[in-house]
Image (cartoon, helix red, strand yellow):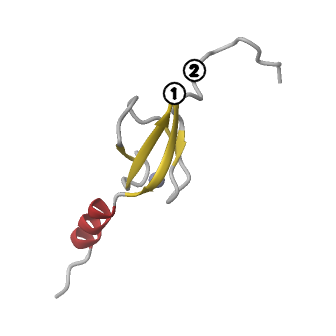
Amino acid sequence: MTAETGGKKGERAGEVRCLNCFARFWPARGVSEAACPECGWSWHISWSGEVAKIRKPVWESWERQLAQSSDEG
Ligand SMILES: [Zn+2]
């Protein structure tokens, strides 16, 4: 392992970790909602400068997914 000082910049900026499947992903800068590319669940995103943070799930999207996946009959 080499010490990375001043290597690639900005890769960590905007990175979030899905609270459902723990995959890391990079939502588009400044978006208020982003869907995890791994599991597809949507999250509310808040921004502090370049740092993104997952706030809470987008329940409407979850309910929509659950409704789609559950078929009674
Ligand atoms: Zn996920």
Task: Please indicate whether residue 5 sits to the left or right of residue 52 in the image.
Answer: right
Q: Residue at x 45, y 42 (%)?
A: 46
Viewer-side residue, 38 vs 32? 32
Give residue 1's mark: none
Q: Residue at x 40, y 29 (%)?
A: 29
Under tag 1, what secondary structure? loop
Amino acid carrying mark 1 in the image: Glu
Q: Residues within 10 Å of mark 1 (few under 14, many from 20)?
A: few
The answer to which quarter of the image holds residue 62 is bottom left
Of all residues shown, which one is farthest toward the top?
A: 6
Of all residues shown, which one is farthest toward the left?
A: 73
Task: Please indicate whether residue 42 sits to the left or right of residue 10 in the image.
Answer: left
Q: Residue at x 53, y 48 (%)?
A: 23
Q: How many marks?
A: 2
Locate residue 11, reporting x and y percent: 57, 24
The answer to which quarter of the image holds residue 68 is bottom left
Q: Residues within 10 Å of mark 2 (few under 14, many from 20)?
A: few
1 lies above or below 19: above
Task: Please indicate whether residue 3 sits to the left or right of residue 17 in the image.
Answer: right
6 lies above or below 38: above
Q: Residue at x 28, y 68 (%)?
A: 63
Viewer-side residue, 54 vs 40? 54
Residue tagged by mark 2? Answer: 10
Viewer-side residue, 25 vs 70? 25
Locate residue 50, reporting x and y percent: 51, 27
Cβ atoms at labels 1 and 2 below 8 Å apart: yes
Under tag 2, what secondary structure? loop
Residue tagged by mark 1? Answer: 50
Locate residue 5, reporting x and y percent: 77, 14
The answer to which quarter of the image holds residue 37 is top left
- Marks 1, 2: nearer the viewer: 1
